[in-house]
Image (cartoon, rainbow, N blue to C red):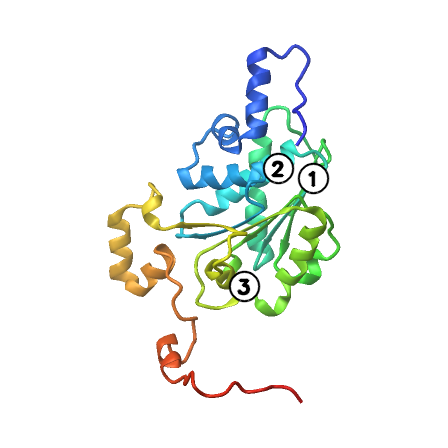
Amino acid sequence: MTRPTLPAGSTLRQAASAMLHSLDPAAFARDALSFTLDPWQSDLVRKMASGEAKRAITVCSRQSGKSTTAAVLAAHTAAYHPGSLTVLLAPTLRQSTELYAKSAAFLRMVPGIKLAQDSATACKLTNGSRIVSLPGEAAGIRGFSAPALVVVDEAAFVPEDGGLFDAVLPMLAVSNGSLLLLSTPNGRQGFFYDVWEDPGDDWLRIGVPWQQCPRITPEFIEEQRRINGPRYVAVEFELAFAEASGQWFDDAAITAIIDPNLPRLSLAF
């Protein structure tokens, strides 16, 4: 991170504010973007911006503000890391461009930030930083190198056969960049679920049920429970990793028929 460039004649207060914003994305959101992040959002963006967390995974309730959180972090990275590349990914291009649109809109609100190039899927700032949105496929990201930040929105829904995470992780190893995964649950399957359940401490893990979002009321949750059923509420708002959609047998039934005393089958030919 570099010291922010200030216009000639800036006051000491303005200089202090600019320095604070460069160091604290939560203060940046509050002062430059005119909204206050929820406590979990502030914790996440601060730890990622400071480098305390290089890998973070967040399992979120619907409408908890996860995309807004990612957009703040993307905008902050582009603004205060000149020449940096931020890559925004999602299962589809439509989803990733929605996240990009929020990030670019935030940048347009910041005094002194100018977009030299601005399209529906990418922008370049006058400080040389870029934000690019892409669909969650390995083939689409292999041409990009040394990203400072990669965000994968709705990461639990990225198709496993696309090879996305196999392509992203080596790219980050070279750049020492940061990776943020955000999603609602999508069954006990795939890379997102495996990382969430991994007992290791190399990932920052944050769970955000609906109770941590002051904009979601108990009355709304009860309405959803009546209309869509308890399983829907458990998965979409209470972070339950239920059996995958379309799974013929539930996990308990599969586990019950496994005999741990049988010898392991060798697949060698």
For badge 3, the amino acid type reads: Phe
The residue that label 2 is drawn on is 77
**Label 3 neighbourhood size at 10 Å, few (<14), some (14-19), many (20+)?**
some
The secondary element bearing badge 3 is classed as: helix
Mark 2 or mark 1, earlier in chain: 2
The secondary element bearing badge 1 is classed as: loop
Position of the C terminus by quadrant: bottom right
Position of the N terminus by quadrant: top right
Q: Position of residue 258 (x, y in %)?
A: 41, 84
Q: Position of residue 99 (x, y in %)?
A: 55, 47
Position of residue 31 relative to residue 197, above or below, is: above
- Between 198 and 9, which is closer to the camera in this rendering? 198
Q: Do tag 2 and tag 1 residues touch (Cβ < 8 Å)?
A: yes
Mark 2 or mark 3, earlier in chain: 2
The residue that label 3 is drawn on is 191
The residue that label 1 is drawn on is 84
Q: Quadrant of residue 168?
A: bottom right
Position of residue 8 relative to residue 144, above or below, is: above
